[in-house]
């Protein structure tokens, strides 16, 4: 593993957003460590409240652990990791998934292309209940194989990577919080088209709990809308607020139309439809309040990140 202080350039930085149990984090780290990690740094940004972090720090001495001072949203955690990363290529994943054993190699290979931002595929993994399937279809179903390589408007938040120069483009959407969807939109508007490379594969590991899942969707939707509303007139914000309930139908139709042609897991899609509907209702509520108030929910405050208690802390906030 490359050392920051040894004068050796770090080829790849891997940022892991940890919002689940530390057993999930351990599984994610073990999957990553199964890769060839020459000239790679691993950065975990964590906000879990259990007491296993010190055990993990000792078990993985080559990993940098950043600990948030309080529970915060995933975009703030990802933004803190990106600010700390030193690699020429930076990838972001999270503890809801496991990476393939060729993930790093395929990342490096894909970045021989000109594209500044590249995403991969997300496959279901193991036995999942209907809530797990609904979470998978909501967030990652469109990234399931078969998946076309080439230009892409949307990339998965748990399998996205970028060349270092990309971080300077629309940096307000990278730090202090990484707003992946809005950032990709801005890049496309200036001619930097994100790409998809299905060979860069991760696996959604399930184990979803209802309340955290719906809370995360509400927070992400509200923050998404509040950021977008900053460039809108009051009239346009009210128009989007009034139209938010229609999102339930739009999102459900978009999800089904992106998954059915793949001819996989259709039964699971049908059976999980009630959970999907509930997830989209919560998302539409979050967007509506984001457009109405223009403020994020829980992401508009300063947060201190302490790197494993060995280095000075850093602060992030909107």
Image (cartoon, rainbow, N blue to C red):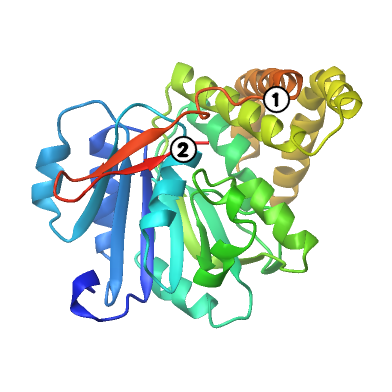
Q: Earlier in the sequence, mark 1 or mark 2?
A: 2
Q: Quadrant of the N terminus?
A: bottom left
Residue on which the image places disc 2? 74
The crowding category of the residue bearing disc 1, from other C-alpha atoms within 10 Å (few below 14, some 14 to 19, many at least 20), is many
Dividing the picture into quarters, in which one does residue 53 lie? Answer: top left
Q: Nearer the viewer, mark 1 or mark 2?
A: 1
Dividing the picture into quarters, in which one does residue 285 lie? Answer: top right
Residue on which the image places disc 1? 294
The crowding category of the residue bearing disc 2, from other C-alpha atoms within 10 Å (few below 14, some 14 to 19, many at least 20), is many
Which numbered dot is residue 247? none
Identify which residue is drawn at 26% across, 52% down.
29
Identify which residue is drawn at 27% across, 77% down.
38
Out of 307 and 139, give the one closest to the viewer.
Answer: 307
Q: Position of residue 242 (x, y in %)?
A: 86, 18
Q: Is residue 151 above or below residue 223?
A: below
Dividing the picture into quarters, in which one does residue 41 lie? Answer: bottom left
């Amino acid at each position: 593993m490359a050392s920051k202080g040894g004068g050796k350039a770090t080829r790849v930085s891997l940022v892991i957003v940890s919002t689940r149990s530390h057993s999930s984090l351990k599984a994610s780290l073990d999957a990553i460590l199964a890769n060839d990690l020459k000239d790679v740094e691993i950065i975990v940004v964590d906000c879990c409240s259990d007491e296993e972090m010190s055990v993990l720090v000792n078990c993985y001495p080559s990993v940098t652990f950043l600990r948030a001072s309080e529970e915060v949203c995933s975009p703030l955690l990802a933004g803190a990791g990106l600010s700390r990363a030193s690699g020429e290529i930076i990838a972001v994943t999270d503890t809801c998934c496991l990476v393939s054993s060729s993930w790093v190699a395929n990342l490096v290979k894909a970045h021989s292309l000109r594209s500044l931002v590249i995403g991969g595929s997300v496959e279901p993994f193991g036995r999942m209940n209907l809530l797990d399937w609904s979470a998978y279809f909501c967030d990652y179903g469109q990234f399931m194989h078969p998946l076309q390589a080439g230009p892409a408007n949307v990339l998965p938040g748990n399998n996205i990577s970028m060349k270092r120069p990309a971080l300077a483009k629309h940096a307000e959407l990278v730090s202090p919080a990484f707003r992946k969807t809005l950032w990709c939109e801005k890049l496309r508007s200036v001619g930097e088209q994100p790409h998809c490379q299905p060979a860069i594969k991760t696996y959604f590991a399930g184990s979803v709990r209802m309340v955290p899942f719906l809370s995360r969707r509400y927070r992400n939707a509200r923050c998404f809308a509040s950021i977008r509303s900053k460039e809108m007139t009051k009239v346009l914000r009210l128009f989007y607020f009034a139209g938010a309930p229609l999102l339930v139908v739009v999102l459900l139709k978009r999800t089904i139309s992106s998954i059915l042609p793949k001819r996989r897991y259709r039964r699971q899609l049908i059976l999980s439809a009630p959970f999907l509907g509930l997830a989209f209702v919560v998302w539409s509520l979050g967007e509506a309040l984001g457009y109405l108030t223009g403020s994020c929910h829980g992401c508009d405050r300063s947060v201190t990140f302490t790197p494993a208690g060995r280095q000075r802390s850093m602060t992030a906030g909107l």
